[in-house]
């Protein structure tokens, strides 16, 4: 071998090793979720300050729960906003899945639609695991429910006593939903459940400590359902809300008479003060947060 050839061979070998090394570390980098957790901490009097904290989570010990992203809703505005959010939400879900996060689809009261699917069976067949505290046994809207906890939170900051239809012509309350909106893909390895025990079984079987929740509606199901914020906090899980991938049932004609989207922001603040941190979808997608086109 000539000196020149030897030199080229050596350089190629070194380059190859270097590339392999870079490739490995990039893969290791990708393995961690880097999140910016936002909470509100009480200072003097009734003043709360925003606190942001960086966190690194193992995607294999993390689940993403999609709450009640149904195919239809009794309120036309609410249904339209779900349709608008579903595409960007699906992009976030795809990124999360690719990073190894367990995706749990939770279209409450519609799981029988999926009864013979492997994703539904994955949830049903997860081995029973005992919860550290009893799950809520109260029923509401077709599942178990965690009502507001007066020891932990004051009344929510928006009046949803009219159920929150913000349409010009008020919608009639009914139950038109049959399944999850089809825009959100359900892939191999995902799970489908609206049940607290099944959710706990799925998490326990995989050693999952961290739960990311998105979907609707924040003043109702995203707090109250048996797979959602209040129940997960009671069970000691690290739960975070994706604050740009949620919506509320709030009618601006009701207190505090702010825009629909300002009402959602107030609910996000409530969660950050009394329940759990929030993140934006950017932490998973690397893209700007989602915004409804009507949000000012
Ligand atoms: Zn409506």
Image (cartoon, helix red, strand yellow):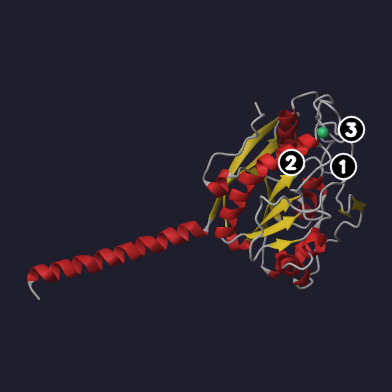
**Residue shown at the point (92%, 53%) measured from the top left:** 139
Q: Which residue is mark 1?
A: 150
* Secondary structure category for the residue under label 1: loop
Query: Quadrant location of the C terminus?
Result: top right
Q: Is residue 96 above or below residue 277?
A: below
Q: Quadrant of residue 106?
A: bottom right
Residue 160: percent from the left, percent from the top?
Answer: 85, 34
Instruction: Sort mark 1 into few (<14), some (14-19) or many (20+) by Cα contacts within 10 Å.
Output: few
C-alpha span from label 2 to label 1:
14 Å
Q: Is residue 180 above or below residue 249?
A: below
The disc placed on residue 284 is: none
Horizontally, residue 190 falls left or right of residue 9, namely: right
- Of the four image quadrants, the one with ligand 1 is top right
Residue on which disc 3 sits: 162
To which residue does mark 2 refer? 271
Earlier residue among tags 3 and 2: 3
Q: Earlier in the sequence, mark 3 or mark 1?
A: 1
Say whether disc 2 or disc 1 marks the residue closer to the N-terminus: 1
The quarter of the picture where residue 279 lies is top right
Q: Position of residue 97 (x, y in %)?
A: 59, 58
Viewer-side residue, 159 vs 194: 194
For the point 64% across and 61% down, which residue is it?
187
Residue 272 shows in the view: no
Crowding at dot 2, Cα within 10 Å, few <14 / some 14-19 / many 20+, comes out as many
The local secondary structure at tag 3 comes to loop
**Residue 209 screen position, x and y as percent:** 67, 60
Which dot, 2 or 1, sits closer to the camera?
A: 2
Q: Nearer the viewer, residue 294 or 172?
A: 172
């Amino acid at each position: 071998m000539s000196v020149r050839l030897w030199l080229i061979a050596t350089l190629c070998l070194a380059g190859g090793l270097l590339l392999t090394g870079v490739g490995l570390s990039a893969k290791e980098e990708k393995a961690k979720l880097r999140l910016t957790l936002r909470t509100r901490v009480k200072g003097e009097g009734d003043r709360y300050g925003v606190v942001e904290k960086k966190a690194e989570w193992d995607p294999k010990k993390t689940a993403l729960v999609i709450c009640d992203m149904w195919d239809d809703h009794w309120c036309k505005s609410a249904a339209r906003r779900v349709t608008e959010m579903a595409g960007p939400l699906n992009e976030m879900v795809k990124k999360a899945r690719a990073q190894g996060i367990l995706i749990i689809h939770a279209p409450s009261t519609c799981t029988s639609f999926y009864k013979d699917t492997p994703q539904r069976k994955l949830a049903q067949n997860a081995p029973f695991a005992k919860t550290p505290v009893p799950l809520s046994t109260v029923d509401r809207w077709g599942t178990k429910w965690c009502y507001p906890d007066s020891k932990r939170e004051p009344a929510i900051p928006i009046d949803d006593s009219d159920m929150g239809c913000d349409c010009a012509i008020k919608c009639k309350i009914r139950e038109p939903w049959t399944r999850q909106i089809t825009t959100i893909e359900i892939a191999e390895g995902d799970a489908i459940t609206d049940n607290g025990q099944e959710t706990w079984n799925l998490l326990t079987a995989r050693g999952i400590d961290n739960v990311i929740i998105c979907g609707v509606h924040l003043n109702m199901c995203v707090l109250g359902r048996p797979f959602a914020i209040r129940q997960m906090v009671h069970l000691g899980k690290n739960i975070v809300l994706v604050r740009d991938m949620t919506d509320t049932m709030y009618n601006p004609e009701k207190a505090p008479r702010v825009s629909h989207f300002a009402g959602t922001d107030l609910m996000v603040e409530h969660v950050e003060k009394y329940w759990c941190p929030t993140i934006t979808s950017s932490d998973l997608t690397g893209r700007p947060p989602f915004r409804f086109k009507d949000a000012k």
